[in-house]
Amino acid sequence: MVVDDEPDIREILEFNLENAGYEVIPASSAESALEKCGQDIDLILLDVMMEGMSGFKMAEILRKERHSQVPVIFLTARSAENDLLTGFSAGGDDYIAKPFSINEVLARVKAVLKRSGARKQENEQKEIVLGKLRIDVARKMVYVENAAVVFPKKELEILTLLASHPGRIYSREEMINELWEDAPYVLDRTVDVHIARIRSKLGVCKGYLTNRSGYGYSMNAED
C-alpha cells in the first residue's frame, strides 16, 4: 500500500513498484488507507505529513488499536532526530527522507519484505517461556503472569530477540544490525527508548531486562 496525499508522488511510486512486480493499493489519506487495510497487505509506504491524520498517527492506530504487524516504511521530508524517534516509536520499520530516488525506495522495500518474511518463517509456531514471561511468537502476543500485554512491532521484536537468548548481552549496535538492517537513521538512543518502553510494560518481569553499562542489554529470569 502506498499512502501519500500528493498525487504525483503516489503515482510515481505506484508505477515503479508495479513495474518491479508488486501489486499496489494506493491511498490519498491515512483515513482512506485505514479503511483499505487488510490481511493481504505485506508492507505500507506511508507519508508522514498529510492533510488530516498524520502517518505517525495511522501507524500508532495500526499497532496499538488493530494490533497489526504489517511492516511500515515512513516517507517524509522531516529528518530531525526527534522525528526519527517518533517514527520508530510509532512502529515504523524504516524511514526514507524526501526527496528520494526510486532505486532507494525499491531497495528498502525489498529489504524490509525479505526481513519480514524470514522472521515470519523462522518464528512460526514458536513460543518462548522465561520465568513468568511467555511470548507466543506466532500470534505476536506477550503474557506476563498469564495476563496479555500488547507490544508494538519493534518492541516485540526486541523483546523476542533478548528472550530467545537468555543471559546473552546484546550491544545497541548488534540490535540495530539485527532488527533495523538497511535503516541508516537508527541511533543508539532509539534502542534505549524502546528498551524503556518494554521495561515499563513487563510489570513483575521488568527485572528480567537488565543493562550492563558499557556492554548492552540482556534478559534472564530472576531466581
Image (cartoon, rainbow, N blue to C red):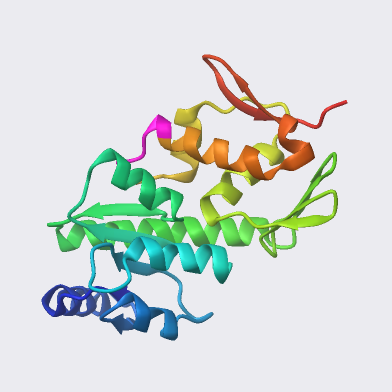
Q: Is 64 displayed left or right of 83 in the figure? A: right
- As drawn, the residue found furthest toward the right would be 223
Residue 179 placement (x, y as % from top left):
48, 44
Q: Nearer the viewer, residue 94 or 78?
A: 78
Residue 33 placement (x, y as % from top left):
37, 80
Residue occupying image coordinates x 50% and y 59%? 116
Residue occupying image coordinates x 65% and y 46%? 160
Position above or below: 210 against 195: above
Whether 186 is among the magenta residues is yes
Looking at the rendering, the stretch of residues picked out in magenta corresponds to 184-189
Q: Is 208 displayed left or right of 115 in the figure? A: right
Position above or below: 207 against 92: above
Whether 137 is among the magenta residues is no
Residue occupying image coordinates x 79% and y 38%? 204
Residue 195 placement (x, y as % from top left):
56, 36
Mark yes or no: residue 123 visible.
Answer: yes
Q: Quadrant of residue 185?
A: top left
Position above or below: 117 against 222: below
